[in-house]
Amino acid sequence: MQRQMFRRTNAPRAYRTHAGRITEGRNGHTTTSIILGAPVAPLPKVYNFMRGARCLRSSSSWAFLRPPSREKQVLLGAVAYDPAVSAIWERMRVYMLEVGVNFDFALFTNYEQQVGALLDGTIDIAWNGPVAHVLASRLAGSTSVVALGMRDVDRDFASLCVARRDANCDNVRGLEGLVVATGASDSPQSHIVPLQWLSDIGVHPAEILPFDLDLGKHGDTARGEVEALNAVMCGRADAALVSEMMWQRAMSNALPSIDGAALDANVAVIPGEGPPPFDNCQFDALATLPTWKTDAFTKALFAMDMANPEHAEAMELEMIEERWMPPREQGYALLERALEKRLASPGFK
């Protein structure tokens, strides 16, 4: 991993939340990334990998030519939506090993693959986005999924409806009959949740124009949201559905492909009511996972403290504002309804 990836970003913290996980999208960096070059997590300092290596030699049960025992290890899965994801979990691995948890991680190219790995026991814990969290819970059947925790920034994630100023949308009902651009069709924040909400209140645009980039990553890269905003700017669409975070980043010139002043001159948030907030990521495990694994992981997770510089380094990598939070389920109701509707549709196989 190149060192330039870890330069501190000057973007305000509000723009650096994953709930992120957003690149020129969900996590606000300015150097290397899948999207126009911005890394995922703003580091408080350059991470010293040699220090981490010493920790691993002293704490890990790794042995040359000896595969680890799955019965004695906690294995987590995460989706590699950005090159920096590996660095994030390398640092978390160092922390877990330091506090005595025999921990490792595996990266997946898409959430559906990760959910499958969770359900068949290939991994113990999945760092799931909201769609994957709901999908895992639905597919688990009698073997229920247990949520273990989330970040503070994962609670109450917001989406916005924005429109060209010349579209004269005084409220969201003005979207009736217009062309609405969205992010990827598997993105909760810029497609699934806001479209379900519009349907619930009886608003039916004439055309939905999704920008299906990086499918399988469920909107984590936010490239589709960037293209949706560009479509509105050039007049290809009348309006767009985007996350509040991406809108703020675009307005503050944090997205290289969008001029904030031009965006402000031509596009505005539609006044009045908007899509309800929803919850974002959760750590998920099967209820059948050995108790010692869930206990060891959650004890270490919730022991992390921003006041401890070593803990803060790892927590800021994951975009946490103050602390890890207990799990909760009430933030997924609208998403659950939207996914049930999609799974029941005649064209779904």
Image (cartoon, rainbow, N blue to C red):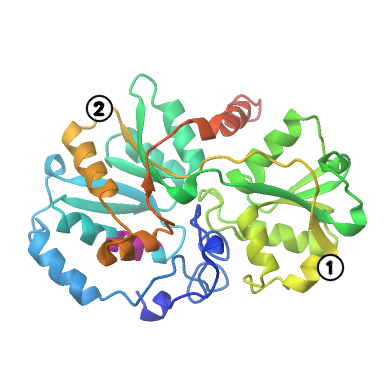
Picture quarter containing residue 249? bottom right
Q: In which quarter of the image is the C terminus?
A: top right
Q: Nearer the viewer, residue 143 or 166?
A: 166
Label 2 – label 1 distance at C-alpha: 55 Å
The reply to whether dot 2 and dot 1 touch (C-beta < 8 Å) is no
**Magenta segment includes 88:** yes
Numbered tag placed on residue 265 in the rendering: 1
Residue shown at the point (66%, 73%) measured from the top left: 253
Is the stretch drawn in magenta largely helix, strand or loop?
helix
Please give left or right for residue 140 compared with residue 99 in the image: right
Neighbour tally class for label 1: few under 14, some 14-19, many 20 plus, Cα within 10 Å: few
Identify the image quadrant of residue 236. bottom right
Q: Residue at x 46, y 65 (%)?
A: 40
Where residue 270 sits in the image (x, y, percent)? 80, 49
Q: Which mark is residue 7?
A: none
Above or below, comparing residue 93 to residue 77 in the picture: below
Instruction: Give the residue type that dot 2 points to.
Output: Thr
> Does residue 257 appear left or right of residue 97 in this picture?
right
Residue stretch rendered in magenta on the structure:
85-91
Sort mark 2 into few (<14), some (14-19) or many (20+) by Cα contacts within 10 Å: few
Per the image, is 126 magenta? no
Q: Nearer the viewer, mark 2 or mark 1?
A: 1
Q: Position of residue 293 (x, y in %)?
A: 20, 39
**Is disc 1 placed on a helix, strand or loop?**
helix
Give the mark nearest the N terminus, 2 or 1. Answer: 1
Q: Residue 28's x, y, as percent?
A: 52, 66
Q: Mark 2 points at which residue?
A: 288
Q: Which residue is drawn at 62% across and 31% down?
A: 338
Does 35 sit left or right of 295 as displayed? right
Tell me the amino acid under the disc marked 1: Ala
Q: Can residue 260 be seen in this view?
A: yes
